[in-house]
Amino acid sequence: MPDQIQPDPIRSRVQEILFERPPTTQRVLGAGALVALVVMIVLLARVGSSGSREGSIPFVTVPPTSVAEQPEVFVHVAGAVHRPGIYLMSPEARVADLIDAAGGPLGTARPDMLNLAAPLLDGSRVWVPSEDDLSDPMPLQEVEGGASTVNVNQASAPQLEQLPGVGPSLAAAIVEYRQRSGPFTVVEDLLSVPGIGPAKLAGLRDKVSL
């Protein structure tokens, strides 16, 4: 038998190095590649998150706007109520609330002649008429020389209509004004009522009183 050719140990070692990787080397390279991939992902995530923060609007909590509470108002109620006088009322109160605070209307009262939904103003006066007030042809007040005038702070709308040049709409405007702004203090205050100008005031000056 011919002799067997023995493998060259040097050639075999070279082939092993060139064409075969030891298992240990493969594991090291694989682990290194995995670590490099994870590091790259983390870096990209940080860059992306920082960029989004720069372009985003920060969350800001805006506290609700506080509205200063309005002070209470002093209002004078007179006429046909059980307890006329000055009352301290809430700024949201209406004429109807003031009448209730004064013990309610008397049996002869005519609260329907008022605007019960009108708001109350500080320093104003509300007159609650009665049947007796409406039965009089006109609330007259004697002045010097025997002449008579109409008290524009107390007369009801129908009574004001008896004044020269005062119709239903103007009489209602006079009553509405004194309910909102308080009693007239001088005759010239009537100029603040819509529909009363200097000419009309001249015709009313000797016919009205306060």
Image: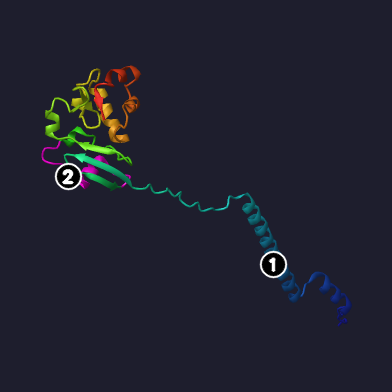
Query: Residue tagged by mark 2?
Result: 104
What's the residue type where badge 2 is placed?
Gly
Colour scheme of the rendered structure: rainbow
Q: Residues within 10 Å of mark 2 (few under 14, many from 20)?
A: some
Q: Quadrant of the C terminus?
A: top left
Q: Residues within 10 Å of mark 1 (few under 14, many from 20)?
A: few
In the image shown, does 32 or 174 lie closer to the viewer?
Answer: 174
Q: Is residue 30 magenta?
A: no
Majority secondary structure of the magenta segment? loop
Q: State how far apart marks 1 and 2 are (Cα).
A: 89 Å
Residue 180 position within the rendered picture, expressed as x and y whole percent measured from the top left: 31, 35
Which disc number belongs to residue 132?
A: none
Magenta stretch in the rendered image: 90-109
Residue 202 lies in quadrant = top left
Residue 4, percent across and down? 86, 81
Residue 170 visible, this angle: yes
**Above or below: residue 42 compared with residue 17:** above
Let me know if residue 116 appears in the view: no
Disc 1 is placed on an element classified as helix
SS at mark 2 in the image: loop
Name the image quarter holding the N terminus. Answer: bottom right
In the rendered structure, which amino acid carries the disc numbered 1?
A: Leu
Q: Position of residue 95 (x, y in %)?
A: 25, 40
Classify residue 160 by image quadrant. top left
Q: Position of residue 59 (x, y in %)?
A: 54, 53
Q: Is residue 171 left or right of residue 22?
A: left
- Asked if residue 101 lies in the magenta stretch, the reply is yes
- Depicted 13 relative to depicted 104: above or below: below
Residue located beneath label 1 in the image: 34
Q: Residue at x 62, y 52 (%)?
A: 52
